[in-house]
Image (cartoon, rainbow, N blue to C red):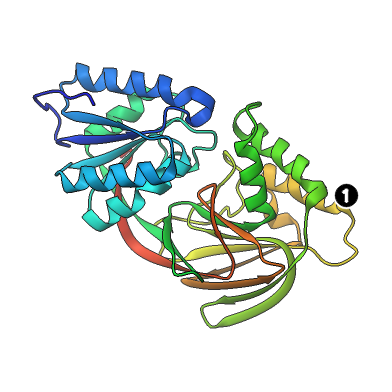
């Protein structure tokens, strides 16, 4: 833990929840740079490092109980996801200093990905933006929150595979993970309810989007917004007898943000999504697999305040 006895910032005392291993080790470097800025500005803060999702969630909750004025994540999308419950339950603002492989939450909020000092300054400026969160209710009774996208099927499998790759970085990392996962692509028969509309389809994946990107900037839901009170739902159809070349072309269109030009991608909007599929599919929230279908997803409008540029 590190602290400064006097704060010269309007944000008060900051609890820094950090994952030093995020971004294949970038987390440690970014943490050092961020805390140097905070010490230089005389900002009261404590550093809480965690190696697991559970530890991050526990540390954030305890920091909130001790009276932190804000929680700041140094890490990637997965670390952001772990602190959402503490931020939401305690009505604390959230800051993000990106240090992950994907950084799609930071990207969604226009937080710079490669300028630590500027990212810290955004927190210290104190300007906040109110955003929606997604809530996932699993069949075993578990409930979890997410900031950007809940992915199922092929997308979730790609996110999991990407965690095991140390090279390359950014979007290329997720592209490589997708290519390696492609031979194991499964067709799932989805039963989908979006509000009062029901759909059945054979699909490779379904993504429930609160923001436009996942996988380090792949714009799977180009029109999704974190403050419009609805999800954008994107289904990647996988009809029987579809050649793998067509699937590969669809993957390329995701990489280059052209999903609207491919009829294999179907989109809807809604506030509540009920998903079931056969065979069962894993669910990732903000890039980390946390459960499996069936799952009900609903939007929480204006759920939290996040530090963001003017």
Pinpoint residue 302: horizontal percent, then vertical percent. 32, 60
38 sits to left or right of 281: left
Q: Is residue 283 rendered to the left or right of residue 63?
A: right
Q: Quadrant of residue 15?
A: top left
Extreme residue in the left direction: 6
At 22% from the left and 38% from the top, the residue drawn is 126
Q: Position of residue 172 (x, y in %)?
A: 67, 32
Q: Residue at x 77, y 59 (%)?
A: 186
In the image, residue 25 sits, relative to residue 95, either above or below, namely above
Residue that mark 1 sits on: 245
Q: Nearer the viewer, residue 278 or 51?
A: 51
Residue 142 appears in which quarter of the rendering?
bottom left
For image coordinates 60% across by 38% down, the residue present is: 163
Tell me residue 194's x, y (percent): 55, 75
Tell me if residue 265 comes above or below residue 92 in the rendering. Answer: below
Give the camera-side residue of 5 and 252: 5
For the C terminus, give its image quadrant: top left
The spot of residue 149 in percent (x, y) is 52, 54
């Amino acid at each position: 833990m590190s602290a400064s006895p006097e704060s010269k910032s309007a944000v008060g005392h900051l609890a820094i929840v950090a994952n030093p291993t995020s971004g294949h080790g970038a987390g440690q470097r970014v943490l050092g740079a961020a805390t140097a800025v905070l010490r230089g500005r005389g900002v009261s803060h404590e550093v809480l490092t965690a190696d697991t999702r559970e530890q991050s969630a526990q540390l954030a909750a305890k920091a909130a109980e001790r009276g932190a004025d804000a929680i700041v994540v140094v890490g990637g999308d997965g670390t952001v996801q772990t602190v959402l419950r503490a931020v939401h339950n305690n009505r604390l603002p959230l800051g993000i200093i990106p240090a992950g492989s994907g950084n799609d939450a930071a990207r969604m909020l226009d937080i710079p990905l490669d300028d630590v000092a500027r990212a810290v300054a955004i927190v210290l400026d104190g300007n906040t933006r109110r955003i929606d969160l997604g809530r996932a209710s699993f069949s075993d009774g578990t409930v979890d929150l997410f900031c950007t996208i809940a992915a199922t099927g092929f997308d979730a499998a790609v996110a999991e595979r990407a965690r095991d790759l140390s090279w390359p970085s950014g979007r290329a990392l997720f592209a490589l993970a997708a290519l390696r996962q492609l031979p194991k692509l499964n067709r799932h028969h989805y039963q989908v309810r979006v509000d009062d509309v029901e759909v059945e389809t054979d699909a490779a994946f379904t993504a429930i989007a609160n923001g436009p990107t996942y996988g380090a900037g792949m714009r799977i839901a180009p029109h999704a917004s974190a403050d419009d009170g609805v999800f954008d739902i994107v289904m990647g159809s996988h009809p029987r007898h579809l050649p793998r070349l067509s699937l590969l072309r669809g993957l390329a269109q995701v990489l280059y943000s052209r999903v609207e030009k491919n009829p294999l991608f179907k989109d809807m909007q809604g506030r509540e999504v009920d998903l079931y599929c056969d065979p069962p599919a894993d669910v990732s929230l903000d890039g980390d697999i946390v459960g499996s279908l069936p799952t009900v997803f609903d939007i929480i409008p204006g759920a939290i305040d996040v530090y963001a540029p003017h």
